[in-house]
Amino acid sequence: MSDILSVLALSDSIRHILSLVCAVVYLSAFATCVVSSGKLKKISSLMWGVGTAINGLIVVSNWAVNGYMPFVSMYQVLTFLGLTYYFVYVYISRRFSSEFLRPYFILFQGVILTGVFFMGKTASAWSFPPALQSAYFIPHVLSYMISYTLVAVSALICIISFFLKGENRLRHEKAVYHLVITGFPFMVLGMFLGALWANACWGSFWSWDLKETWSLLTVMTLSSYLHLRRTEAFGKYAKVLVIFAFIFEIITLFFVGMFDESSIHSYS
């Protein structure tokens, strides 16, 4: 196994180029996917598969270079997050017969890998701090990745639904609900595992750290959506909360470290 990983430990320059190629392939797959032509849709599926394979190669290369599951730096997390969208879509499309959601998942992959490319070619290597060396590390991050993937797509579909009418609008609103009820348990699980991890590492299940607070706010917002959508008075407005949940998700993932460098979730 170590011999295989050593072969796949590509240089920073090659991974940097591959991230650009991957982004271009994903975005091209998105562009051809939204066209109604059957031939172009087949080409889109082929490009999507190629993009996923390249994305997977980058993830494995990051793993080989660092020697651990590549979830530590933002570069590693985003690269893996891009790959996550494919597998989450496969489940959602089969579970709820929602093949029409494919372009949205591909679009997010293209945007994420574009961001990875602009992070620079030396961003892959990262030290593995003691606080992250826990059995909770991988399941905690994976749970949040799955939930973040689903919330991101549901928020985009929610925005699009405002511009639709009739059955098409109802179909999109139903898809939003399916995505949220699938992602919500993973978000709660991620928070639960994080609390167990925090107690094992710092001696406390919860410390009201800024990242914890924004994560809790995201969970409460999605919970409010799931409750209010069933009420007659607020049901038609509840989906707006999904958009706010996505905003809170972005703040939690990208901006909390900028607001509070002393956060216990800052490992650098």
Image (cartoon, rainbow, N blue to C red):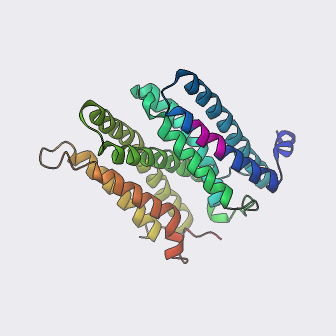
Q: Is residue 172 above or below residue 189?
A: above
Q: Is residue 13 above or below residue 266?
A: above
Q: Residue at x 81, y 55 (%)?
A: 13
Which is nearer the eye, 137 or 15?
15
Q: Is residue 154 left or right of residue 76?
A: left
Q: Is residue 248 above or below residue 61?
A: below
Q: Is residue 8 above or below residue 37?
A: below
**What is the x, y in percent for residue 28?**
61, 39
Task: Please identify the residue farthest to the top as the structure is shown.
Answer: 38
What is the magenta segment's predominant secondary structure? helix
Evaluate whether residue 11 shows in this view: yes
Residue range of the region highlighted in magenta in the rendering: 24-29
**What is the x, y in percent for residue 11?**
83, 53
Q: Residue at x 66, y 38 (%)?
A: 51
Quadrant in which the N terminus is drawn: top right
Q: Residue at x 26, y 52 (%)?
A: 224
Task: Please identify the residue farthest to the left as the structure is shown.
Answer: 233
Q: Residue at x 86, y 45 (%)?
A: 6
Quadrant in which the C terminus is drawn: bottom right
Which is nearer the eye, 46 or 89?
46
Say if the magenta span includes residue 239. Answer: no
Q: Is residue 225 left or right of residue 145?
A: left
